[in-house]
């Protein structure tokens, strides 16, 4: 499943993390942001995909797709979460 | 276990991801970087810790600690990696 996000401020970065951790592919439209803010989102998204072993793809200037790791679905059925600490 | 990293360029961000994914706490010394580069590392590290449900702590200006999620050790024994896709 795919979630499209069009953040207006850096405070919204947490939502990208939320959906991506849930296993959604995230289409990230940064075209509404100033260049410095867009850069921050790209850096944040880079950390996110590296942290979860996903991938990031640039579609057009300011539009990116964050691909979740293979085998992970939004329901989590394909790769069960390990909840024990 | 703790790994201290003093990156000199943004190319080194991948190492932060590597050690953090392995379960190390990472002390990130950004004092050798220009402000714009340091900002990029902070954004990257924010994505990384959110992706893995860890935490980031600012120690002094330019020095941060990235805490891995609870229960994860560098050897991976406490929370085994799920390798099947």
Image (tube, coloured by chain):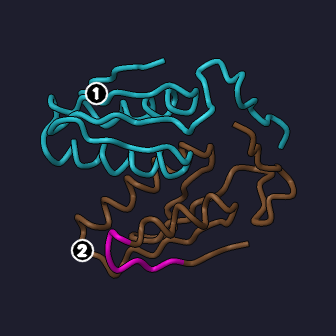
Chain colours: A brown, B cyan
Q: Which mark is residue A43?
A: none
Tell me which chain the residue with mark 1 is part of.
Answer: B
The residue that disc 1 covers is B7
Residue drawn at (45%, 76%), measured in percent from left and top? A29
Residue range highlighted in magenta: A5-11
Residue B24's place in the image compared with A8, above or below, is above
Distance (Cα) linking label 2 and label 1: 27 Å
Quadrant where the C terminus of chain B is found in the figure: top right
- Left/right placement of residue A60 relative to residue A35 reads right
Measured from the top left, where is residue A47 in percent x and y?
46, 47
Q: Which mark is residue A34?
A: 2
Looking at the rendered structure, the secondary structure element under dot 2 is loop
Looking at the rendered structure, the secondary structure element under dot 1 is loop
Residue drawn at (13%, 39%), measured in percent from left and top? B34
Measured from the top left, where is residue A65 in percent x and y?
56, 65
Q: Front-most of A17 and A30?
A: A17
Residue drawn at (80%, 58%), measured in percent from left and top? A76
């Amino acid at each position: 499943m795919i979630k499209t996000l069009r953040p207006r401020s850096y405070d919204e970065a947490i939502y990208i993390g939320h959906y991506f951790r849930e296993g959604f592919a995230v289409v990230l439209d940064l075209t509404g942001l100033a260049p410095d803010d867009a850069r921050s989102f790209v850096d944040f998204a880079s950390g996110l995909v590296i942290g979860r072993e996903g991938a990031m793809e640039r579609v057009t200037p300011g539009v990116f797709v964050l691909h979740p790791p293979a085998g992970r679905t939004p329901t989590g059925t394909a790769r069960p979460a390990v909840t024990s600490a």
